[in-house]
Amino acid sequence: TGRKLLGMKNPYFFAILQQPEPMMNALAEFLKARNTRTAALIHVDELFGLEQAGALEAAFKEKGIQIVEKKSYPLGVKDLKPVLNDIKAKNPDAFVALSYPPDTFLVTAQAREIAFNPKAFYASVGTAFPVYRDKLGPTVEGVMGLGTLNPKSSPAAKAYFAAHKARHNKEPDRWASAHAWAGLQVMEQAVAKVGLERKALRDAIASGEFDTVIGKVRFKNGENVATPGVVSQWQSGEFEVVWPPDRATSPALHPKPNWK
């Protein structure tokens, strides 16, 4: 795959954040387990949206979930209501918006405006940030998105959230920021083991397993293969992990509650 080539061509590069395939496979698995038959997909016409959409299409095909509508939209879009009205008319079981944060806010607000409320509503990347909850309030209840953990996930996660809030006077997001801290923990442990010689340090990271805030981390071809794809969902003010089952911090709300 492209990532394997990336690992071979860039031996000093390690991607700790989950890549599109595991994240979109997790979403497909979650939806398949809830007998989802049809889905609609929109995505920003940028690398993030294109990569995630490609992975999701493959995952849906493998799981037998039919995509009844797929639309891309440009960066900086100001109105998605015509697209959402078109999708609402098709009545899909699930809706997925692979979006940058401003679009995540937009698609959530406009779906609520037109009362488009499918059984599963998934929007990212903006969903993982506390400001999404704080700005939209009860509207976010039942909305899913990309995530990894929350303070309930482990004692290490609880301590990380508390330290972040004490230092910055605000909560971290429930996805990428903890991975950044985990990357520092990987480096710290590798340096403690082999010192600062670049080749030895690189080899230690490539071959080792590390205890971090996101759990065990292990790399293969430059990719973290120990952290699974995760589906999270806003429930009563927390971005609960609802998939995979062994990492879940709460049962999923499915079908999604009506918009508030």
Image: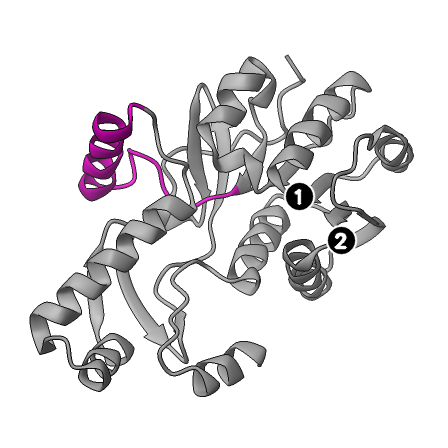
In front: 260, or 165?
Answer: 165
Q: Quadrant of the N terminus?
A: bottom right
- What secondary structure is marked by label 1? loop
- Residue highlighted by disc 1: 99
- Residue highlighted by disc 2: 45
Among numbered discs 1 and 2, the one appearing first in the sequence: 2
Asked if the residue at tag 2 contacts the one at tag 1, i.e. Cβ–Cβ closer than 8 Å, the answer is: no
Across and down, in percent, residue 109 comes to 70, 22
Across and down, in percent, residue 113 comes to 78, 17
Sort mark 1 into few (<14), some (14-19) or many (20+) by Cα contacts within 10 Å.
many
Check the image and report above or below for 78 versus 134: below
Residue 58 covered by magenta stretch: no
The reply to whether residue 125 is visible in this rendering is: yes
Query: Residue 83 occupies which quadrant of the picture?
Result: top right
Q: Is residue 199 left or right of residue 135?
A: left
Sort mark 2 into few (<14), some (14-19) or many (20+) by Cα contacts within 10 Å.
some
Across and down, in percent, residue 185 comes to 20, 57
Separation of disc 1 and disc 2 at Cα?
A: 9 Å
Query: Residue 82 occupies which quadrant of the picture?
Result: top right
Check the image and report above or below for 96 versus 254: below
Mark 2 residue type: Asp
In front: 183, or 145?
Answer: 183
Q: Which residues are magenta?
A: 146-169
Residue 158 covered by magenta stretch: yes
Mark 1 residue type: Ser
Check the image and report above or below for 161 versus 47: above
- What secondary structure is marked by label 2? loop
Query: Residue 107 occupies which quadrant of the picture?
Result: top right
